[in-house]
Image (tube, rainbow, N blue to C red):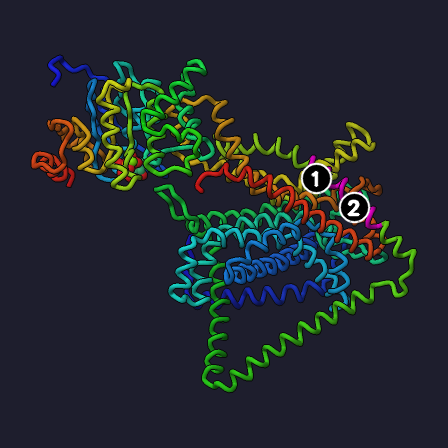
Amino acid sequence: MLIVLTRKKLYFFTLLATILLTWVPARLVTIRANLLEASLGNLAILSLFSLGRMTTAYLLGLISAILLEIWVSRSEHLVKYIFPVLDVLQSVPILGFLPAGLLVIRQLAPGRLGTELVSIFLIFTSQAWALMYSALEGFTTIPSDLLELKKAFNQRESSFIIKILLPYTFPFLVSGSILAFGGGWYFLMAAESFSLGNEQVNLPGLGTFLFYSAYTGNLKEYLLGLLVLLLIVVFIHEIFWSPLSEFSKNFRYEFTSGEVTHKPALTIKLIFSFTKVILRTLEKVYFFFNSVLTSRQRVRNTFDTFVKFTKIVLIFLIVIYLAFSLYSIQPTNFSFTQLQASLLIIVEASICMIYSFFRVFTAYIVTLFLVIPLGIIAARTVLRKLLLPIFDIMQSTPAIAFFPFLIVFISSIMGINQFSINLISLVLTMTGMIWYLLFNVVISLSNIPEDIEEMLKSFKAKTSTKILRIYLPAAAGGIFYGTIQAFGGGYNALVVSEYITFGSQVLTVRGIGSFLNKYSNAGNVVALTVGLFVFIVFVATFDRLVWVPILNRIKRFRFGD
Amino acid sequence: MESKKPIPILEVRNVEKVFIVENKEFQVIQNISFSVNEGEFVGIIGPSGCGKSTLLRIIDGMIRPSGGKVLFKGKEVLQPSDGMSFVFQTFALVPWLTVEQNVELGLDSLNIPEKEKKERVSKYIKFVGLDGFEKFFPREISGGMKQRVGLARALAREPSLLLMDEPLSSLDELTARGLRDLLIRLVKSTETPVEAGIIVSHNVEEVVYLVDKAIVLSGRPAKVIEEVKIDLPRPRNTKTRSFFKYVDRIISLIS
Ligand SMILES: Nc1ncnc2c1ncn2[C@@H]1O[C@H](COP(=O)(O)OP(=O)(O)OP(=O)(O)O)[C@@H](O)[C@H]1O
Ligand SMILES: [Mg+2]
């Protein structure tokens, strides 16, 4: 069933989409959604709210990722410095961004709009890094001769971006988007209902609904909410991510012969034509202004100065504003006891960080033991066709939604004691790490070339040899690519895995995640900032000094370089 | 040269291969028969994509034919056997194993003591002229050397039949010429246990230089157009009239 997209139809669709995109949200804000009512109508509204936040945050992340990539493409050395920064940023737990988000954004935009923006910002921080990573990764796969070509032929920037940069990045962006969206769902609860001191924010949404039904121990409602969430996740996956990822294979450079072209599904076609229309309109507007400006040199000059001037003024205003808001949160009279207190907080944060590190590290090791055999089975056996789609859907499903079951399961076996709480926390932390490792291991193992597999068959290599000499090393190559992100995911998960609200009780273990929760509930911005600072310093030094050197040793277990 | 009645080491009998792609059958190989005698070096030549590699993989036992059968030393080939070794066009070396370890991979299925394994590995590394490079990784050596590793790995199994799928096609012309004589030595001399060899190629000159008999295949589906016996004394001179006559003959058969 193919719809031929004529230009007329395109404009019609654009119109329709614009109406939907502007009118529906405008209507929705006026609808009074009930936070907790479990009727289907209410759940549908809550879902739309959540989906709207997710999509807005996602689009912002996508645009930032592409802009970052364009920026990086202009200077070759930049990419080296950006990866480490991203490594750290993607590790920062969502609550680490909360004070900044609340204080800055809320002052810019008060009221409901402001809270919505904070929530979108929080979701953004759980999505954007994966998108940026994949955009940059896509950039690094552009062959250097194409980059040279750009210089040699003095290729126009826009043509470089459209013809080379974006096509090369496309498949990476798609897989990054799937990861990012999954990450967004994972932290939906934390992003929709959070507290800073006295300020308890509960935005109408599926996340809040789930949080409160779990909090009040209302199992039936919780299950209903969970079901709706899963339906949405699977629906989006089927209608959107899965066809998109199939379509993106067209852009992948492959060695095998007998390639098939993957025809785009209808949804993908619509999205593409929609984007195309927007881009074309933007281009027309741009060319119009450009022609007006170039025709009159003087106008152009004034315009340029005006742009420069506005930029400077804007930066100036932002700096002043930031300084002002920082000043307003500083205690005005700084006394010795306060200094002492903040020193104590640094010590406390550092100790918590060490606890957390060991938690994440243990989770990492256990995850590896799971992921390697699972990866081998999923990538190199007949179960491939069955398992990969299952993993895909599981990855987009926020594991956090299943936390209550897990907690009930573990605590019913062992009771609630220090050990079982730590175990629960460990497993929860793993849910934030596993996909980065599993997918990279699967990719690495899938990249084992056909000729190697044929060679093993022809020479009748033993299964043990195959596993020890080929599969395990290849898996290690994948681990190289997944580890830093997995650690980031693990650190991220700490705010929900070290401070678990379950029914009316709160299970906590010592660590930076519970530290952040504690001080964010207490509204102690200074402690939050100190915690964030300790965290960033720790992660940055640890990544550079310990991980990168170790990981570089397993980098060679990779086919194709 | 040999007066005795030649013994076939390999017989290909009415082999057919049909692949099923997206529920449609398409025939790649149609009723191919030929045999390879002891001491013989046979070439399979045909247009690109006609099914040469598929045929060689059927002979090795990596894939099963849709019809007909392959007899190796009188027994039907149902799966890869220790008596045959395969050399890959793309070398098929494992990047994180050294030259030595890659060669040793060929010995994995053989039940021989560790010590003998080590001896065989170094013997055949020396034979292909790679002594001194045992501890190098594939990425540290040139293309020609990589294929030497591929050859050493195949030889270390001490097979009686060597199957080579375009072993020289990924190499540049000069390197490939350098390796041709090594291939002849492998198959024709008594220095190795190899009793016969089959090489797949689409380079006509290479085939005329190397083999005793060329099986010329047609394009899809692959059928035998003709078996061309190449009666030229070795070492062959590529500049002679008789050499060119063979080259022209095969080219006119294919096109
Ligand atoms: N496993 C497979 N499934 C489906 N089709 C296949 C398969 N293997 C090979 N083919 C097809 O069979 C045909 C013959 O392939 P083969 O690789 O044997 O040709 P070839 O003569 O070795 O080609 P080349 O000169 O490129 O090496 C090709 O059209 C190929 O696409
Ligand atoms: Mg071939």
Q: Are marks 1 and 2 on the same chain?
A: yes
User: Which circle marks residue B165 in the picture?
Assistant: none
Task: Locate residue B223 relative to residue A406 in the image: left or right.
Answer: left
Quadrant of the rendered structure where residue B194 is?
top left
The residue labelled by disc 1 is: A360
Closer-to-camera residue (A416/A17) = A416
Q: Position of residue A114 (x, y in %)?
A: 74, 65
Judged left or right of residue B92, residue B210 is left
Label 1 or label 2, whichever lies nearer to me, is: 2
Q: CA distance from mark 1 to mark 2?
A: 15 Å
Which secondary structure dominates the residues rendered in magenta? helix
Chain ID at mark 1 = A
Residue at image coords 25%, 40%: B174
Question: Is the residue marked by circle 2 packed among few (<14), some (14-19), or many (20+) residues within 10 Å?
Answer: many
Q: Is residue B116 left or right of residue B168?
A: right
**Residue A295 in picture, x, y percent from top left:** 45, 84
Q: Give the residue drawn at x 42%, y 38%.
A: B139
Q: Work out which quarter of the rendered image holds the C terminus of chain A and state it.
A: top left
Q: Amino acid at mark 1?
A: Val
Q: Which mark is residue A350?
A: 2
The magenta region covers A345-362
Image point 66% across, 51% down: which residue? A88
